Amino acid sequence: MGRFLKSALKISLAFGTLLLVILAVAVGIQMSSLPSFDDMMRSPNGQSIRVLSADGAVLVSVGPSYGQWLTYDEIPDVMVDAMLAVEDRRFRWHPGIDPLGIARALFVSAKTGDRLKATSTITQQLARNIFLNNNRTWTRKAKEGLLALAIERKFSKEQILELYLNRVYFGGGAYGIDAASRRFYGHSARTLSLPEAAIIAGLVKAPSRYAPSSDPERARQRAAVVLSVINETKPLPDLAAAQADLKDITFAPQARQNNVRYFTDWVMSQLDILTDETVEPLVVRTTLLSSMQKGAEDAVRTQTPAEAQGALVALSHDGAVRAMVGGKDYVESLYNRATIAERQPGSAFKLFVYLAAIESGVLPDDIVVDEPVQIGGWSPRNSNGRYVGEVTVRQAFAQSINTVAVQLATRTGFDAVADMARRFGIATPISRQPAMALGASTVRLIDMTSAYAAVARGGIEVRPYAVTSIETARGRKLYERQAENPRVLVAPWVAANMTNLLQAAVETGTGRQAQIGRPLAGKTGTTSSNKDGYFVGFTGDLTAGVWMGRDDNKRVGGLQGGTAPARAFAAFMRVATKGMPVVELNSNIQIDDTLSEPDAEVYGLDGTIAGYPDEYYRGGPDYQGAIEVPVDGDGNPLPRVHRPGTLDNAWLEEAAPPVEPSAAPDPM
């Protein structure tokens, strides 16, 4: 019997030794295949992106959030103590797997008949998080143990803790303690307090259940348990005080996930152009202002008719997008009506008609006639069905008289109007048929808003932009917006005269409901059968455009640009301009004098014709239109004068006596 026992013991020892050799070889092979520490620092689960507003608020976090990588020396001791207490008390001495923990789990399972409970060490959890999945199989568990042993042989305990604390999932999309600290407390994990560390440590067991973003009170209750466990392993100076401090923790507001997503989706679509970084976590800083965004969302929600959708875009005059709403509810519809939808702008398109007319010499006080017009088989009519006869250009624009807009477009040329719209950034196809003068072409709201912003900027191009900088979570700068050299679209005097018309539309015309008690210019737009309502306008600091309508293009009862859209504009602007100094608009009537020189009066370049009565000079009391002075072959002005009271550039041979050659100064 003794010999048998000795033989059995020898066989067992030999078999055990063989198993140890096999295990050692397997661990060695696994060690050789492990990536380096630097490689293991890289994100295994995809890139995370945080989008911030101009005032630092987190607008959205996309993908897994890893925050900033903290070295072991940068991790607070309270965080290490808390994690070891709740996840792996024997971490400092076990070889990667915990034999005592396994033995205890087997004993409890045999005694109670319950299923064997998990006994994963921190090293095993790290192996699973980086290399494996969460499938509950013995094969996966064996691989996990083997990887844990290999990791312990290749890396120090401090390196393992550094990897684990920067990679473990804490709920709310946050991977790693820095991401969790920023997500839940709004600051770096370098400054975690004991109660804050206890909350984070308590999340590993069930992140979705205990995350403060899901249930703050449950997170505090779990943290109280964690503090008790910490006290068992490493007595705290005052456990009761630490637990009481949990009540005073203030959690950071969570990223808004509703209507601001219209803006962040637009931002995300631009990142591929601005950076080629696809691995490291990104922090994207934008132009959006939280207060303006809230004002925009409230304005669209409260002013848009129940059966309709609404959109709003607000730009600083350098093109920075300060607010964007693409619909009443992002959850219900993520279609961005501010940047994607193409709808008819109605009379808001008259901006380009009048810009082209002003550039050709028309002034706000010129006289035009509101009367029936027929072009081919098409005859435009006014919305009220009436004609008022002679009015000034300013009155015609303010009251949005259709017949005058068509007359001006006809005189200037439909191609010239289309080219003006294209010049101001309208990228959608533009009709060159007569009805285009009344907004028959479809446009995007953001394009129309930037066009009006260019007028507010004095005729200088405005290109909407949202991203000011992109950097990695470590602070490496990948992109920073540089100041552009915008084009001059029209002369300043053209923009000033256009502003004069736009201001009249708000003060005395169809846009009166947009008034906010400070200088304001803008234009309404309404399409046939009230399918679309537009209002676009600006103060001295900000331009905003509002669109309302149905996605199926059906009629919306009572919808006009001067009603709900104008009211939404006013509601937003009151919030957006609160606290801003009042800035006067440059709307004084101006005349192009860029070519004036001392002898200019000879050629009529200063608005006069030598030898003609003063009342026909440009700017004189009877002057009603642009003077285009015909000259003879020697450059002398012909004896003609503009017919007062008209815009037709007709010239009367008999209106004034010929200029005697000796009466004109030598042009040289």
Image (tube, helix red, strand yellow):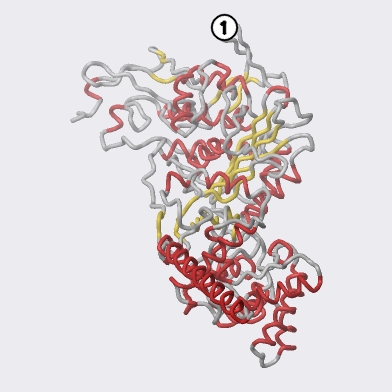
Task: Examine the rendering and report whether any part of residue 535 can be seen.
Answer: yes
Instruction: Look at the picture and state if 109 lies above or below 646.
Output: below
Q: Position of residue 50 (x, y in %)?
A: 55, 57
Say whether residue 83 is visible. no
Task: Please give the name of the residue rendered at 32% of the width and 19% of the height, measured from the top-left corner.
Answer: 630
Residue at far left of view: 668
- Seen from this angle, which residue lies furthest right? 112
The total of numbered circles placed on residues is: 1
Q: Amino acid at mark 1?
A: Gly
Label 1: few (<14), some or many (≥20) within 10 Å? few
Residue indicated by mark 1: 376
Where the N terminus falls, by quadrant?
bottom right
Q: For the C terminus, which image quadrant?
A: top left
Residue 57 x %, y %: 59, 61
Name the image quarter holding residue 204. bottom right
Q: Nearer the viewer, residue 285 or 26?
A: 26
Left or right of residue 558: residue 312: left
Quarter location, residue 175: bottom right
Left or right, 510 with reference to 153: right
Q: Nearer the viewer, residue 245 or 80?
A: 80
Q: Find numbered disc 1 in the image and state the secondary structure of the residue it sits on.
A: loop
Residue 301 at x, y percent in the picture: 74, 45
Vertical placement of 31 versus 312: above or below? below
Q: Residue shown at 36%/36% (left/top)? A: 593
Work out which residue is located at the far top of the displayed protein and give it.
377
Q: Position of residue 279 (x, y in %)?
A: 45, 54
Of residue 65 and residue 365, the one placed in the foreground of this image is: 65
Question: Does 77 sit above or below residue 621?
Answer: below
Q: Residue at x 43, y 71 (%)?
A: 154
Q: Nearer the viewer, residue 427 or 418?
A: 427
**Which residue is found at the position 70% from the left and 77% from the top?**
104
